[in-house]
Image: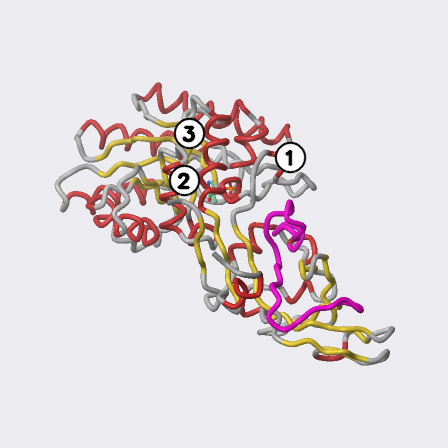
Amino acid sequence: MNASPDADAATRPFREAVVDLDAIRENVADLARLVAPAQAMAVVKADAYGHGAVPVARAALAGGATWLGVADLAEAVAIRAAGIRAPLLAWLHDPDAAFATAVERDVDLGVSSLAQLEAIVAASASVGRPARVHLKIDTGLSRNGVAPEAWAEAVAAAVRLERAGRVRVRGIFSHLANTSAEEDAAQLAAFEAALAAASAAGLAPEVRHIASTAGALRRPESRYDLVRLGIGIYGIPPFGDGTKAADLGLRPAMTLRGRVAAVRRIDAGTGVSYGHAWRADRPTTVALVPLGYADGVPRQASGRGEVWLAGARRRIVGRIAMDQFLVDVGDDAVAVGDEVVLFGDPATGAPSADDWGDAADTIGYEIVTRIGPRVPRTYVGGA
Ligand SMILES: *Cc1c(COP(=O)(O)O)cnc(C)c1O
């Protein structure tokens, strides 16, 4: 038991990103319930959007996710190395990827071209069992995936290889641009056509999937057999239209916080931080927060971002530097060592990752994903 808040604070790191694994588990459980009977894939690429891939994967599986998804094969290998056995898909490949590794570790592979399919089949020959692949059709994102005009040829090759026992086409998938209702509908129509062509040619995939969090929430017709849930499981809304996590029944999992490193009383006219981009217009107190752009605090948010400190939201003043920035606390009592929360659950009064996204002209996704390596991740919940 902590005798006082100060004793508690004294045991805290100077900077930390606290990840609440119960929030992850509950967000997954709520989303899985919403999309059922479709299955839920937890997308844990980019170190689970900065939250830590292995602990998040475990919490998501506990919440009812039946699949895991990553971009790179190396990310999938790290998940297998931690002993996690759930179905796992990787979809963005180095042209020289060691695909045999994927087959050895039971990692399903997204396939975006005939050449990629052939490389995967050639690599799996040495393993002695067929690779499991998910053929990806580009329905309009114009990013990865087989082009519609190349689809028939890729499907024909996949049918031939599957009949020869050299590959198993376990899935067919695509990705929505989340542009507008009309454009999403056009993508879904293109997906339907690709599925029909694949079925006519003789493919019978176990899972068809196209929706990420946005589609899973707003377009029930896009859920098919499986939805790939990224940002939603972290408790951050996907829409960028002012919708709050709480409106969606989701709870932000990450709290980024630190401890005040210095407090200074300044006179009217005093400039602070590089270039004196801000000068006090009255005598005031500024508090030094020991996180900067090295830690993923966007310099773009200088003068705009806010933190939660001593019971109120406080505005950043002056430029955000590599390691630190200042906030204006007026005449309030703030002490060295006080806890300062950059973002967390808005229900606590703190700003959200999305608020920082707005302050830096970006999105909540980028804010959490770019928290730097100097910030330790600590975990609560998820026992
Ligand atoms: C990142 C990603 C997702 C998850 O998207 P969210 O918007 O975070 O839910 C799903 N599918 C693919 C192919 C992705 O790259």
Residue kind at label 1, given as amino acid type = Asp
Please check the rendered image and state whether residue 340 is part of the magenta-colored stretch, yes or no: yes
Please check the rendered image and state whether residue 194 is part of the magenta-colored stretch, yes or no: no
> Which badge, 3 or 1, is on the more N-terminal residue?
3
Location of residue 368 in the rendering, given as x and y in whole percent from the top left corner: 54, 54
> Which badge, 3 or 2, is on the more N-terminal residue?
2
Q: Is mark 2 within 8 Å of ligand 1?
A: no
Circles 3, 1 touching at the beta carbon (< 8 Å): no
**Which residue occupies the foreground of this view, 84 or 362?**
84
Compute the Cα span from label 3 to label 1: 23 Å
What label sits on residue 247 in the rendered view?
1
- SS of the residue at dot 3? strand
**Which residue occupies the foreground of this view, 26 or 299?**
26
**Which residue occupies the foreground of this view, 170 or 163?**
170
Residue kind at label 2, given as amino acid type = Ala
Q: Is mark 3 within 8 Å of ligand 1?
A: no
Residue kind at label 3, given as amino acid type = Leu
Location of residue 307 in the rendering, given as x and y in whole percent from the top left corner: 67, 60
Q: Which residues are magenta?
A: 329-356
| Point 37% across, 29% down: residue | 152
Write down the quadrant of residue 154 in the picture: top left
Residue bearing mark 2: 60
- SS of the residue at dot 1? helix
| Point 58% across, 74% down: residue | 323
From the viewer's perspective, tell me whether residue 356 is left or right of residue 233. right
From the viewer's perspective, tell me whether residue 100 is left or right of residue 330. left
Residue bearing mark 3: 226
